[in-house]
Image (cartoon, rainbow, N blue to C red):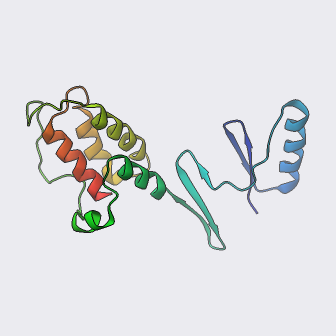
Amino acid sequence: MFFILYVDDMVITRSDPIVIASLKRHFQSEFEIKDLGFIRYFLDIEVAYSSRGYLLSQQKYIADILDHATLSDPAASISAFISTPMELHLKLRCDDGTPLSQPTRFRELMGSLKYLSATRSDISQAVHVLSQFISAPTSAHYAALLRVLCYL
């Protein structure tokens, strides 16, 4: 059995229930704590339990990103299936396309993808390339960003 104890923003794990119970009593004597039981969702990572082990997923986080980008329409996502996050041999430059009038959405989506790329190595190269244009994104850069989102 695997036990988890949350203390503020801290997760403590240990497989020995006696040690966990002792640790809980110690923390309760020093601090006001609340035991939330088994972890289900932490740092945008979902945790699912089964007899075969644990499954870690960021599917909900990806759905939230797509929703924020207004790409969550199921019909659109089926027709926009893409097998790679970026076109092969794509060379993006600073002066490609027209500058975005409001680059905030590009920057927000790039921040989300940057966090996601820590666990999704398949998009890390595309995110790295696109992050070079964060200060002055253009329509071409945004189109490449949308391709990464469609890939997800």
User: Picture quarter containing residue 105?
Assistant: top left
Side of 44 where 85 appears, left or right: left
Residue 150, compared with residue 94, is above or below; it is below
User: Picture quarter containing residue 53?
Assistant: bottom right
Q: Residue furthest top?
A: 135
Side of 99 where 4 appears, left or right: right
- Which residue is located at x 38 percent, y 51 percent? 67
Residue 136, compared with residue 150, is above or below; it is above
Residue in the foreground of this view, choosing between 86 and 136:
136
- Which residue is located at x 24 percent, y 65 percent? 81
Q: Quadrant of the C terminus?
A: bottom left
Q: Residue furthest bottom?
A: 51
Task: Tell me where residue 20 appears, x and y as whole percent.
Answer: 83, 49
Q: Quadrant of the N terminus?
A: bottom right
- Which residue is located at x 56 percent, y 56 percent? 46
Task: Tell me where residue 132 appears, x and y as whole percent.
Answer: 23, 32
Side of 10 where 98 appears, left or right: left
User: Picture quarter containing residue 130?
Assistant: top left
Task: Tell me where residue 16 appears, x and y as whole percent.
Answer: 81, 55
